Image: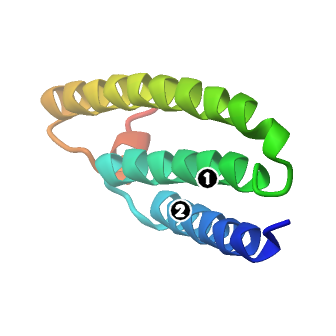
Amino acid sequence: MSTPDFTLYALTAISLYIIGLYGIAVRRNMVRIVIGLEIITASVNLNFLAFTKLDQSLLPLAQYFVVVSTVIGAAIAGLSLMIVIQAYRHYGSIDAKKLSKLRW
């Protein structure tokens, strides 16, 4: 087994997850929030592939999941950026705090 490789990949995935959570929790800019979500998605995909280092029979299944997740993530990123553009056109700001004050 190649456990040191798994440890390196798992630590990298955890690091990316923490960076993504930081981007979502601290930043008020909606574009940066979308980027934080995409970083979290990348960390989950890396974690899927890291577990294939423990059992090579999972490699094709993990690759399929990662490809499908990447395609769905790209579609979600495009849709969310379109919503950000429409919010900017309508309200003149992409600051999440300012837009949350616009609730009823």
Q: Secondary structure at mark 1?
A: helix
Point out the image quarter for the N terminus. bottom right
- Residue position for label 1: 46
Instruction: Work out whether residue 104 can be spotted.
Output: no
Residue 69 rendering spot, x and y as whole percentages:
57, 30
Q: Is 100 positioned to the left or the right of 12 in the image?
A: left
Out of 58 and 25, give the one closest to the viewer: 58
Image position of 93 with respect to 1: above or below: above
Q: How many marks?
A: 2
Q: CA distance from mark 2 to mark 1?
A: 22 Å
**Residue at screen point 71% across, 66% down:** 10
Q: Quadrant of residue 65?
A: top right
Out of 99 and 33, give the one closest to the viewer: 33
Q: Secondary structure at mark 2?
A: helix
Q: Is 73 positioned to the left or the right of 88 in the image?
A: right
Out of 102 and 19, give the one closest to the viewer: 19
- Residue position for label 2: 25
